[in-house]
């Protein structure tokens, strides 16, 4: 009779040899299972992509429908877009084109004050420290 620890060791070795040296159909069946899992995963990914594309298309169609519905409501209520008429002042209807009339609307600086300001700027720019 073989002692107990040797018996379990022998059983483990026999099982390992049986798996390693076992029929090639076991390895083939594992490869087939892996291939089937990969195929199922690819099919699931493709189905997810189709579902996302369908959802995006449905949302786009829904937004288009809502826009068209609101436009029809606005048209039926008579709230269409309307550009307001420009408002003209009585003075702008007949503009004289002489320089004196046009210059009266703009602020002016006397020539003497403008020359004095220019002289101060030039002197400040020459006086560098």
Image (cartoon, grey):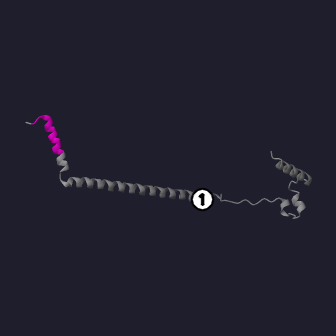
Give the mark count: 1
Label 1 sits on residue: 71
Q: Position of residue 86 (x, y in %)?
A: 76, 60
Q: Front-most of 20 and 67?
A: 20
Q: Position of residue 108 (x, y in %)?
A: 88, 54
| Local crowd size for mark 1, using a 10 Å CA cut-off: few (<14), some (14–19), many (≥20) | some
Q: Front-most of 106 and 11?
A: 11
Residue range in magenta is 2-15
In the visual, does 80 lie left or right of 115?
Answer: left
Q: Front-most of 17 and 56?
A: 17
Looking at the rendered image, the quarter that the N terminus falls into is: top left
The single residue placed furthest to the left in the displayed view is 1
Magenta segment, prevailing SS (helix, strand or loop):
helix
Quarter of image, res 74? bottom right
Q: Secondary structure at mark 1?
A: helix
Q: At 88% from the left edge and 53% from the top edge, which residue is drawn?
A: 114
The single residue placed furthest to the front in the displayed view is 129
Q: At 89% from the left edge and 60% from the top edge, which residue is drawn?
A: 101
Q: Front-most of 67 and 75?
A: 67
Residue 9 covered by magenta stretch: yes
Q: Position of residue 55 (x, y in %)?
A: 46, 55
In the visual, does 117 lie left or right of 60?
Answer: right
Residue 78 covered by magenta stretch: no
Q: At 60% from the left edge and 59% from the top edge, which residue is drawn?
A: 71
Q: At 11% from the left edge and 34% from the top edge, which residue is drawn?
A: 3
């Amino acid at each position: 009779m073989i002692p107990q620890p040797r018996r379990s060791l022998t059983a483990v070795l026999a099982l390992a040899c049986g798996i390693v040296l076992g029929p090639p159909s076991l390895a083939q069946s594992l490869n087939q299972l892996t291939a089937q899992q990969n195929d199922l995963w690819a099919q699931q990914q493709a189905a997810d992509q189709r579902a996302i594309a369908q959802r995006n298309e449905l949302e786009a169609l829904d937004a288009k429908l809502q826009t068209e519905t609101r436009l029809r409501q606005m048209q039926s209520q008579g709230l269409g877009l309307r550009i307001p008429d420009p408002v003209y002042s009585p003075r702008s209807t007949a503009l004289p084109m002489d320089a004196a009339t046009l210059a009266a609307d703009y602020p002016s600086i006397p020539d003497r004050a403008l020359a004095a300001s220019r002289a101060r700027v030039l002197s400040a720019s020459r006086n560098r420290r």
